[in-house]
Amino acid sequence: MKKLIITGVDGNLGRVAAKEIQQLVAPERLIFCSYNEDALKPYQELGIETHQTDFNQPDGLADAFKNGEKLLLISMPFVGAKRQAAHQNVINAAKSAGIKQIVYTSLVNAADPTNPSVEKKDHIFTENAIKEAGLDYIFLRNSQYAEAMITNYFTYVKGDGVLKNNQGDGLMA
């Protein structure tokens, strides 16, 4: 029996996905992954297969995915070459492990060449890597994550309340 894999169960979206899928799928059909071993313990107690994974390190990823059929790849919380490499590690390991389908949390208009956003570049890189791997896929093209925006606002409110750009002059949309 092949299983469904949820990555990032320690994060905001991953935690909600883990909670919701447990209402639909028996524990023995699930694999939950996180870099945070403590976040996995409650799921282990429920009889869910868990694996501590670090997508920045490809070693052991294919073993963590070997019993899976479908994998939810929740995009990593960093940008640029580091995220692209981490996503590529997951895709390579998924293919090696025999995963049939990747569900990926991408971005609206990821392929739009007029959008120079670093975020967009990472998402289209990952979408293309999944396609090139020959895996079936579903791309969940979300708009900006609301919780990310709210988290940022609270960060600034707890500070001096001024949103600063990289020049530090406070001129930011």
Image (cartoon, rainbow, N blue to C red):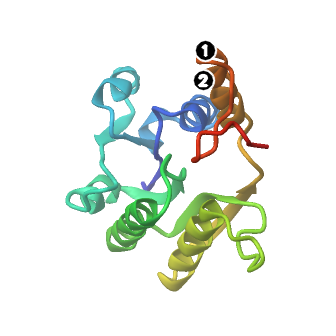
Instruction: List the residue tagged with mark 2.
Output: 155
Q: The residue tagged with tag 2: helix, strand or loop?
A: helix
- Residue located farthest toward the left when viewing the structure as drawn: 59
- Residue located farthest toward the front when viewing the structure as drawn: 169
Residue at 57 percent of width and 79 percent of height:
128
Q: Which mark is residue 158?
A: 1
Rendered image quadrant of residue 90 = bottom left
Picture coordinates of residue 112, whole percent (x, y): 76, 76
Picture coordinates of residue 147, whole percent (x, y): 68, 32
In the image, taking residue 127 as reference, residue 133 lies left or right, namely left
Q: Residues within 10 Å of mark 2 (few under 14, many from 20)?
A: few
Q: Are marks 2 and 1 in contact (CB under 8 Å)?
A: yes
Give the quadrant of the C terminus. Answer: top right
Q: Amino acid at mark 2?
A: Thr
Q: Nearer the viewer, residue 163 or 126?
A: 163
Q: Nearer the viewer, residue 43 or 1?
A: 43
Asked if residue 135 can be seen in this view, the reply is no
Q: The residue tagged with tag 1: helix, strand or loop?
A: helix
Picture coordinates of residue 97, whole percent (x, y): 33, 67
Give the quadrant of the N terminus. Answer: bottom left
In the image, taking residue 143 as reference, residue 118 lies left or right, namely left
Picture coordinates of residue 50, whole percent (x, y): 33, 38
Q: Which mark is residue 105?
A: none
Q: Amino acid at mark 1?
A: Lys
Residue at 36 percent of width and 29 percent of height:
40
Rendered image quadrant of residue 91 = bottom left
In the image, taking residue 27 as reference, residue 85 lies left or right, namely left
84 relative to 23, above or below: below
Residue at 59 percent of width and 72 percent of height:
127
